Amino acid sequence: MHWFVRRDLDGFFGLFVDNLVQLLLVVALCGELCGMTGDDAYLLYGRILPGAAISILFGNLFYASQAHKLARREGRSDVTALPYGINTPSLLVYVFFVIAPVYRESGSPQLAWQMGLLACLGSGIIELGGSLVAEKVRRHSPRAALLATLAGIAIGFISMTFALRIWSWPLIALVPTAIVLITYFSGIRFPLGLPGGLVAIGVGTLLAWLLPAAWSGREMETATVAGAWSEAGVALPVWSGGAIWAVFELPVESWLRFVSVIVPMGLFNVIGSLQNIESAEAAGDRYDTRMSLSMNGAGTILAACFGSCFPTTIYIGHPGWKALGARAGYSTLNGLVIAVLCLTGTVALVNSVIPIEAGMAIVLWIGIVITAQAFQATPRSHAPAVALGLFPAIAAWGATVAYGAFVSAGGNTIQSLLTADALAEVAGFLIHGLIVLERGYIFTCMVLAAMSVCLIERRFFGASVWSLLGALATVLGLSHAYQLSGNDVDFLLASVSAREGAIAYRAYEIAVGYALMAVVFTAVGFYLRHFGAPLEKGGHA
């Protein structure tokens, strides 16, 4: 397999856009919410971004090398590397529930950064430990359970997110979208063999610069480019182990309270990466689970040790990159380019020249492929299980939109709404129900889909086991339980006390409900086994 093929350019542009969005989020959120501006901007440009560069480069090179090894071992030339980058859910959660709260309480961006490093390190350790047992989990989980979650995330957090942006800037984004759909749905190649992704981004960028803001809704200015260029400068990674160790010299309660954030996110990252490895195998590339997840954890630990507060992970979307024709070169190129941007402080410069809207259609297409794979790569009879597994992820997307709407609106909060009426609705949707289904949705998606597969195959005792796992996750606080303070919704682990003044929901009745479902499934299983009068599927005894 060649180190680089022409279609790697398409894969690179898609993965690059995805990674660039994460970097822009880091810059915006750490600057606005965590005080990393002015004299403290060095924490962002001199610590976090260089640390992210090291972990992203290291991981992308590893997964590219892993793809070549698989190609040599199987005598193939069509192996696609696992995509890799900053974990979006962890980024948002660590900013809003670790770094920003510490900054608000202490007024110190330095301390907020150090707490973020600790959270990132904890996530990496959990991911590294999870690699030891992940293959067993994978072997005993139906494919529908692993792929349904990815499909739900693809619909809500990838396809829907970018679809909304495409139709918000239609004159810039819809023409690139047409080019992407022609390229990947119709399979038509452009003259001179130009990659469709490159053509789409080129056309979108040209439209953004030529059309006036009154038409396009996106103002591109040379002054912005000049300002971004003036802020560029080389910043090499700095060892930050001492900054992490200094956190442990503080009172234990100052950092122990973040365990309720770190543990669930670490476990979510393990399960999410496991699902992505299963997705790659369904697309034809079988990678070693333990080795892949070990690198995942090691990359996150490396990020923390060199200054980044944000875990890295195996990305969703391998089937999409494979369908693009990308192999290993797209991963290598992505790692190199992202590293250069982070180490030279030119993230803002690229954004000032190339609008995100120009490349969003590529990422939208990736989400479409992932959703289609969940149905195509599982037995046809398991399609209802995949469909049921979508609901928690879609609820998570809806809850995220609701949280943001309340924060943006100001004044009334989700807490005051539920305090006045625990069954309050917004446009006919229960707010409490959204939060309950959103908390730990990765676990809930797996449980519901796996339970449904067992029922479809009439393995009632297996369905009981999955129901009991759902009950256990709920009791531990990994699913459904939450604490709500104002507009801040957080996990509520069984071993952690709720914040003073917050609404605390332990979800014990949901755990009991799961247990009762297990009783029902077990009773049906015993009936069929001992009375020899099987119930007709979909009918009567």
Image: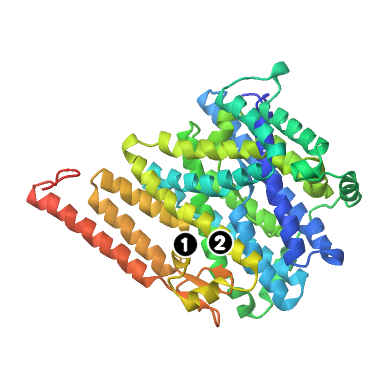
Looking at the picture, tell me which residue is in the foreground, 413 or 135.
413
Identify the element where label 1 is drawn.
helix
Q: Distance from label 1 to label 2 (Cα)?
A: 9 Å
Quadrant in which the N terminus appears: top right
The structure residue drawn at horizontal position 41% and vertical position 37%, both measured from the top left corner, is 375
Identify the element where label 2 is drawn.
helix
Residue 282, quarter of the rendered image: top left
The three-letter amino acid code for the residue at tag 1 is Leu
- The way the protein has been coloured in the rendering is rainbow
Q: Is residue 458 left or right of residue 265?
A: left
The structure residue drawn at horizontal position 26% and vertical position 64%, both measured from the top left corner, is 516
Q: Residue furthest front?
A: 214
Q: Which residue is mark 2?
A: 402
Relative to residue 429, is residue 499 depicted above or below? below
Q: Position of residue 395 (x, y in %)?
A: 47, 56
Residue 70 appears in the picture as rendered:
yes
The structure residue drawn at horizontal position 37% and vertical position 65%, both measured from the top left corner, is 472
Q: Residue furthest bottom?
A: 500
Q: Is residue 264 left or right of residue 19?
A: left
Relative to residue 447, is residue 11 depicted above or below? above
Q: In the rendering, which numbered label is found on residue 108?
A: none
Lower sequence index among marks 1 and 2: 2
Classify 10 Å Cα crowding around label 2: few (below 14), some (14-19), many (20 and above).
some
Relative to residue 241, is residue 179 depicted above or below? above
Q: Is residue 541 left or right of residue 83?
A: left
Looking at the picture, tell me which residue is in the foreground, 453 or 263.
453
Q: How many numbered markers are drawn?
A: 2
The structure residue drawn at horizontal position 32% and vertical position 48%, both measured from the top left corner, is 452
Q: Which residue is mark 1?
A: 434
The three-letter amino acid code for the residue at tag 2 is Ala
